[in-house]
Each structure stands twice: as structure tokens, then as C-alpha cells.
Image: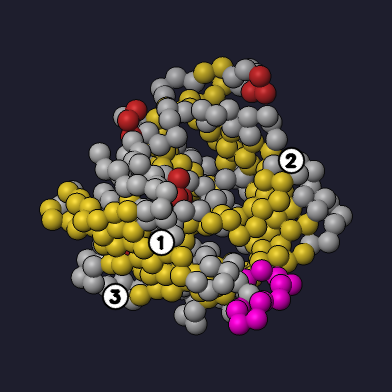
Amino acid sequence: MNAGCGNADWGGYDPIQLPLKGATTLPFTDFEVTVLRALGVARTYSSTDVMVGNAAGIFGLGWQYNWETTLTCSSNGASCTVDTGAGGKMKFAAQPSTVVGAGAFSGEALVLYKRTEPASLAAGGNNLMVRRPNGAFVLFQLDGSELYFVQPAACGSCMDASFNGSRRLSRDVDAAGRGLQLDFTVSGKILTVKDDLGNMLSLLPSAACPTLAGKLSYRAGTDGVETVYVTYEYDAPCQLLKKVVPSNVTAASGHSAQLRAYDYQSVPRAGLLTTVHNEFDDPVTVFGYDSSTGYATSLLDAQSSLAVTYPQPNQDKVVSSYGNDSSTVLT
């Protein structure tokens, strides 16, 4: 159980985020392999994303994943926001004077960006960002890692020459200098992620739903065979992720082969996740919602159970909570 954080209170194992009145799943990793850096895909669901009317992502309504970080700037690059999806947003403002770079940026006149949120609300901490003379943005994180946002050569509607618009994450470098290169422009693929040795993870579009991820593949090295390890299945309107299936797996008698399967309800809005099923098709998480507001009101899972009422705006009340090895703490 998450006992609360600086910005919000949470109830349950796959939690209800109380101030947003939304159901949220913990990140589920569909596939991961580590050589230099972990190459994998992890997804998390938020009913708040559905209730505010956001469009379906590459895994359908409500789902976000670990490689969708974007940089958006306006006012000719004076104001920028880094959106890490499930990890929250970071807001930056350009400083009036440039600074002289050091190290890999030695001698460069860098535009410096500082966080604009109060320290208590700054997700990820008061990190810094710079814009290089070549137009590349680099975000320096408190753990020593760096995120690069470089405009690809082929980009239909990205950031203009005055730094208005958006860019996707192009490179992720950890504190030890080990990089991952992201490419959203490879023909026939939604995304590729490569480490410095050429090991590559790919997401390929679904045949039935071309805007959604249909398969996850991995290639070892630069000359290995690209093999599909996971397949994603959706409903007929191509809005809802229904099942995540491992490749080349024979299901046990009486069961279907799956990593996870999902059920949803359509009232008051289509796409509200109600049940998460495990590999044996057992329901391991069940969310309940208010039928008129869409607020998450109850949670049953393997480690906790709770019901929540919202007697007044911005006021939450836990009706009951218990668990095998967890607790619910509100502050």
C-alpha cells in the first residue's frame, strides 16, 4: 500500500488516487530483458485519463506506458512542459540569460530552463533543462540521468523553428552513461528502443487496429533474429485493451494463454476498467465506480479492500480498509 505522497493520497494495492477520485493500476511489465539497460514495456491504467476524455493511446483508452515522455514548448520556447505520462508533468521557464556549457557541452551558449512549480509540487524534484545551440533539449534529472529531445529528420507536425510544438523523447541516458535510443519513425513500427550494443525492442501496429500496438518484439544485438514475445488484443471498435498474450505458450488445461486480461464498463463513460485477470483468468483486482460521476468508489484486490465516499468536494472518507500485509493511510 502506498501510504501517501507529496501531492496525493492513495488507497489500496492497485490503488484509488483519492484527490482525483480515480482508479490506477500499478505498472505491469509485459516484457523486459537487461543487457546494458533494461529494455521493456510497462503499462499503467488511470480512470481519470478516461473521465477527462483523453484519446486512446497506443494501448487503448486509459493506458499509458514507460516510453511516452514528450516535451511541449510555447511562446517561442520560453515556456516548456515535460509530460512523462503516468509519472506526471514538469513545467519549465527559460531564464533571461544564457549560460556557458561545460563537459560535453563545453563552450556552448545554453538556454537554461528552471522549474516553475513550488518545490512541494515539483514532481521529480527541482531539476534543470537546457537548450543547445543546435536546438536539442536536455533534461538533467536529480538521479544523474539525462533525457534528450531531438527533432527527427522526418516529423510531420513536431516543433517549429521558433520552438513551438512538441517532441518525443529521443534518448535516455542513465547516471552511468548507458544510453537508450528511441525512434518513432521506423517504417512498419510504432516504436523502437535500442541500447548502445544494438539490442532492440520494438512495438508493431495491430493488424486489426493499426493505430494501436499489436505486437512486442525483441532482437539481440545488431544481427540477431527479431522475435515476437507478446501480442495485444483489443475490442472491435479498437478502443479497449482486452488481453495481453505471450507468444509460443501453450495454456494449461482449462485456461487461456494470457499475461493479463481486462474488463471494462461503459457507464458513465466507456473505458472504465473494472477487473484485472491474471494468467489463470482469476480476478486479481476489481474496481467499482459511481454510475453518475465515474468516481472510483471501491477496490478489491489480493492485498487490500476498501470503499471510499466523497461527502464534499476535495474531502475523502474511507469507509473500510483492510489487507493481508498492507494498510490505508490518509494525511
Q: Which residue is mark 3?
A: 267
Task: Judge depth for marks 1 and 2 and give the one in front.
Answer: 1
**Distance in Å between CA atoms under marks 3 and 2:** 45 Å
Is 152 situated left or right of 57 in this image?
Answer: right
Q: Which residue is mark 2?
A: 36
Q: Residue at x 61, y 82 (%)?
A: 254
Q: Which residue is mark 1?
A: 301
The mark total stands at 3
Quadrant showing the C terminus: top left
Q: Residue furthest left?
A: 312
Is residue 60 at all visible to an observer of this figure?
Answer: yes
Amino acid identity at mark 1: Asp
Amino acid identity at mark 3: Val
Q: Earlier in the sequence, mark 3 or mark 2?
A: 2
Task: Name the spot of residue 197 as percent of width and height, x first.
Answer: 80, 43
Vertical placement of residue 122 versus 168, above or below: above
Check contact, mark 3 vs mark 2: CB within 8 A: no
Instruction: Choose top left, top right, bottom left or bottom right for residue 174.
Output: top right
In the picture, the disc for residue 57 is none
User: Which residue is nearer to you in this view: 219 or 282?
Assistant: 282
Magenta stretch, main secondary structure class: loop
Q: Residue at x 59, y 32 (%)?
A: 145
Instruction: Choose top left, top right, bottom left or bottom right for residue 297.
Output: bottom left
- In the image, the segment drawn in magenta is 244-256
Q: Earlier in the sequence, mark 1 or mark 2?
A: 2
Q: Is residue 219 magenta?
A: no
